[in-house]
Image: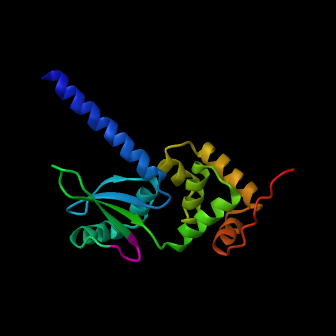
Amino acid sequence: MADAARARTLAEVVTTHVAEAALEAIPAPAFVINAAGTPVMVNSLGRAVLDASHGDCRARLAEVARVPRDSRDFRVTAIKSSGTPRHWLVVGQGAEPCTRAREAADRWQLSPRQRQVLTLLVDGASNARMAAILQRSERTIEVHVAAIFSRAHVNSRGALIAAVLGRRAPAIEAST
């Protein structure tokens, strides 16, 4: 009996880690919500939105749970698993800065972590805030920001944001 319980616990832990990794791979704010609209799993971009929204995002997620359908702000997918309560995957969409940041990241060939930093930077996060969200040191964030500046051929946050939002992001040329 104890072996079966340990196996179930291990399976739950593995499933949770896989789900968390899958959420982090989504390049937009992503939430798994329960029937009450409470976020039960959130990626780092989603945490940033929750922290910055002063409750507005939580209220909108509760509304999504009441009427689970896509909107201009969210794409909603039911998570169906036999014997479990209702849950939905809610992914932010239509956020122009997020879309443009993703396009710029593609052009600049940024690493997955640099992509996260760029998205947070465009959303106005400080290095300290990005470090807290991404669970990295401020120095690591500074290194990522410097690398993004180099790839984008800019020397300030303002110039970077203008390049992202103004679609003036230069392409990286292949070295010969």
Nearer to us in this view, 103 or 158: 103
Please give left or right for residue 88 compared with residue 129 in the image. Answer: left
Q: Please say which color scheme the image uses.
A: rainbow
Spot occupied by residue 3 in the image (x, y as percentages of width and height): 19, 22
* Main SS category, magenta section: loop
> Where are the magenta residues, as a range?
70-74
Image: 123 above or below 127: below
On the image, which quarter does residue 16 sit in? Answer: top left
Image: 78 above or below 81: below
What residue is rendered at 72% in x and 72% in y?
A: 168
List the single residue furthest toward the right.
Answer: 176
What residue is rendered at 31% in x and 71% in y?
A: 60
What residue is rendered at 20% in x and 63% in y?
A: 36
Q: How many marks?
A: 0
Q: Examine the structure image and report whether residue 139 is included in the region drawn in magenta.
A: no
Spot occupied by residue 27 in the image (x, y as percentages of width and height): 50, 58
Nearer to us in this view, 135 or 18: 18
Spot occupied by residue 47 in the image (x, y as percentages of width and height): 41, 56
Q: Examine the structure image and report whether residue 71 is included in the region drawn in magenta.
A: yes
Nearer to us in this view, 131 or 110: 110
What residue is rendered at 43% in x and 45% in y?
A: 21
Spot occupied by residue 4 in the image (x, y as percentages of width and height): 17, 26
Nearer to us in this view, 89 or 52: 89
The quadrant of the picture occupied by the N terminus is: top left
On the image, which quarter does residue 71 sit in? Answer: bottom left
